[in-house]
Image (cartoon, rainbow, N blue to C red):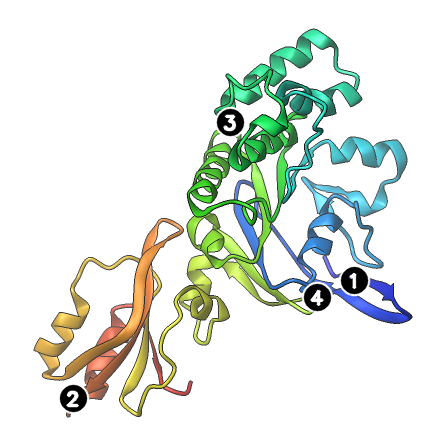
């Protein structure tokens, strides 16, 4: 909480974190999204204290890591797994050797290590690749090895550092599905950073938009989508911004079974022209955002009707 971190770069002071407050609930998948240089990686590395913040506190599973040093900190870090963007596999070791490496460092005996590695490779769908080398694997398979290795010490928290940015869309989808399944089966808490809004849309329960070392907004994804002026909603569902005086933005923050636009035109005798937008599956709900021209004598009543049904209606320019 209240994390600050600054660096010296060519005699200039660069602020990477500026009072960031982050709370991830047990068992949720939390995404931090932002462009390069926003401070995402520094934030992630601060969680396991690979980067020690200049001020503020980091607590994981009720234990304050910023108060620990030496062997106590190393022991606490074993409850936190890390998945890297570019896999970070050892080319000279087999798949089994890579997955078992953290256990070897921790002094786990060979028999227990072998059994644990076998369990993990089956869990990530690579049970037949134990003797293969990283050079023989696809990008998606390499990332699965990285995930298995991160789970070797049975962590409670999994950190994902742009884990899908080097993968093609189909492989990205399979890795996100794997992370979701691991969360459900193992009760993991997952914090991931990304620059891809699709990752937030497909897997995250909560999210934050980060810029210049600060959170612009944060919270449950569905709550943010239903918040007036939400940056997340605008990013997930871009719509035409060149509307006229009759244009409104209609946001669906949850699933609706009723054909509300059709009912709108019948009940209030207005014209409703959808200019753009979309409805997609997000956090288990069909949500979306539309740009709509609504014209007619009973326009105000029609918009009030949408609001009463739980949709967020914003006039152009709001």
Query: Up-down: is 133 above or below 304?
Result: above
C-alpha span from label 3 to label 1: 36 Å
Task: Please tell me whether mark 4 sits on a helix, a strand or a loop.
Answer: loop
Between tags 3 and 1, which lies in front?
A: 3
Depth check, front residue: 260 or 112:
112
Residue at label 4?
Answer: 213
Residue 279, given in percent of the width and then of the height, sits at: 30, 61
Q: Inspect this view and state whether residue 311 appears.
A: no
Labels 3 & 4 near each other (Cβ < 8 A): no
Between tags 1 and 4, which lies in front?
A: 4
Which is nearer the N-term, disc 3 or disc 4?
A: 3
Residue ID at (33%, 64%): 288
Labels 1 & 4 near each other (Cβ < 8 A): no
Residue at label 3?
Answer: 124
Residue ID at (23%, 87%): 300
On the rendered structure, is 139 left or right of 51?
left
Which is nearer the N-term, disc 3 or disc 1?
A: 1
């Amino acid at each position: 909480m209240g994390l600050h971190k600054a660096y010296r770069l060519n005699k200039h002071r660069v602020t990477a974190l500026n009072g960031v407050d982050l709370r991830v609930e047990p068992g949720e998948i939390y995404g931090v999204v932002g462009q390069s240089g926003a401070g995402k990686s520094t934030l992630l590395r601060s969680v396991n204290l690979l980067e020690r913040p200049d001020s503020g506190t980091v607590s994981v599973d009720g234990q304050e890591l910023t108060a620990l040093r030496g062997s106590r900190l190393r022991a606490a870090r074993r409850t936190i797994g890390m998945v890297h963007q570019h896999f970070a596999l050892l080319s000279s070791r087999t798949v089994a050797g890579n997955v078992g490496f953290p256990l070897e460092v921790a002094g786990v005996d060979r028999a227990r290590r072998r059994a644990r590695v076998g369990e993990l490779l089956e869990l990530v769908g690579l049970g037949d690749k134990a003797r293969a080398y990283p050079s023989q694997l696809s990008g998606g398979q390499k990332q699965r090895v990285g995930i298995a290795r991160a789970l070797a010490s049975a962590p409670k928290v999994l950190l994902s550092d742009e884990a899908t940015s080097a993968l093609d869309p189909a492989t990205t989808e399979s890795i996100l599905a794997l992370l979701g399944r691991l969360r459900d089966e193992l009760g993991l808490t997952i914090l991931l950073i990304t620059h891809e809004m699709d990752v937030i849309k497909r897997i995250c329960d909560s999210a934050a938009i980060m810029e210049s070392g600060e959170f612009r907004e944060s919270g449950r994804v569905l709550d943010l989508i239903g918040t007036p002026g939400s940056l997340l909603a605008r990013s997930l569902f871009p719509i035409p911004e060149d509307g006229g005086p009759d244009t409104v933005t209609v946001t669906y923050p949850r699933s609706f079974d009723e054909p509300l636009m059709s009912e709108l035109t019948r009940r209030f005798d207005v014209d409703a022209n959808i200019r753009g937008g979309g409805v997609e599956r997000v956090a288990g709900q069909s949500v979306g955002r539309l740009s709509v021209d609504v014209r007619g004598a009973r326009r105000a009543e029609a918009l009030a009707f949408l609001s009463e049904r739980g949709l967020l209606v914003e006039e152009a320019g709001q």
